Amino acid sequence: MDKNLLVLRRRVGEVVSIAGGIEIEVMEISRTRVKLGVIAPRDVVVSRKEALATASENRKALELTGAVPQRVIDVLRLLHRQDEKV
Amino acid sequence: MQLVTSESTLIHSPWLGDVDRSPDCELYFPAGLPGFEALRRFLPVEIPAQRPLVYLQSVENSDICFVTLPVLVIDSSFDLKLCEEEKNQLGISAESTPVIGEDVLCLAMLMPAGETVEANLSAVVVVNLHNGFGIQCTPPFEECAIRRLTLSGDAMPQNGWTRIC
């Protein structure tokens, strides 16, 4: 997909508008961080970019459901017993 | 996929069988979980023979069920750090320091890793035990993948887990 970079300067309280009813407001600026408020339709997923890695890990985690190796369960049971003794 | 209606009292989970859907036990994730943002209601399920595993069964999509472990089972010195935003989402005051087991439930997602499993301690699931609200913490990029442990079934070291990265 062809993408362009648009650079805008905004002050606190000012808003960037994106097609599809999405608005991003600069709410607070500190020395190292910017607090943004995002208004978007409910079906639009808004998240930090880091969450994409977690999303991928969560999808991988689902592969385990119903297929937890018995060996793992056995070891966990042993660990649990050790915990109970402490 | 089976959708669970509001009248249903049982969730027919393909993984866990029929799970009693007690509203008192339901956990609510206002933002869902990363990758599953539309799913906001989960039930924590324990199977006695598989303790201390905790299954997080979606109430809204019976096919979705995560396998987790309490973080303290994996790392007894686990230090939970929540930013102001995360505390806000959980309904915890910015000044307070929640205690795992007393104020919050803290779970690590398990992922398959060959014959064994990895525990994701970077993006832990945190639930406020006082109101049932939950989030999955998203670590900053620089902290990703540094807190993942794999279960060593053969060697059985002191706590059974080996840091892999």
Image (spheres, coloured by chain):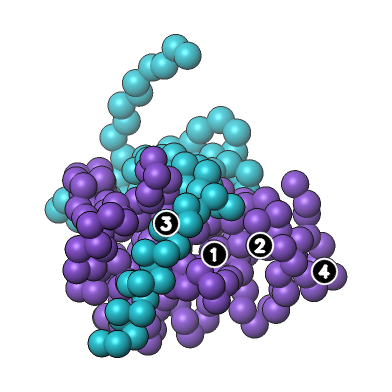
Element assignment for label 3:
helix
Residue B16 numbered mark, or none: 2
Which chain does purple denote in the image?
A: B
Label 4 packing within 10 angstroms: few (<14), some (14-19), many (20+)? few
Whichever of callouts 1 and 4 sits on the residue coming sooner in the sequence is 4
* CB within 8 Å, label 3 to label 4: no
Residue at the outermost left position: A31
Pointers 3 and 1 within a single chain: no
- Residue B33 visible to the viewer: no
Q: What residue type is labelled 2?
A: Leu
Question: Same chain, marks 1 and 4?
Answer: yes
Q: Mark 2 lies on which chain?
A: B
Residue indicated by mark 1: B55
Q: Could you say which is closer to the camera, residue B115 or residue B56?
A: B115
Q: In which quarter of the image is residue B88?
A: bottom left
- Gap in angstroms between the C-alphas marked 3 and 2: 19 Å
Residue drawn where x is 65% and y is 56% of the image: B15
Choose between A85 and B39: the one closer to the eye: A85
> At numbered mark 1, what does the secondary structure look like: helix, strand or loop?
strand
What crowding class fits label 3: few (fewer than 14 Cα within 10 Å), some (14-19), or many (20 or more)? some
Q: Mark 3 points at which residue?
A: A71
The chain letter corresponding to cyan is A
Q: Position of residue B139 (x, y in %)?
A: 29, 52
- Asked if both marks, 4 and 2, belong to the same chain, the answer given is yes
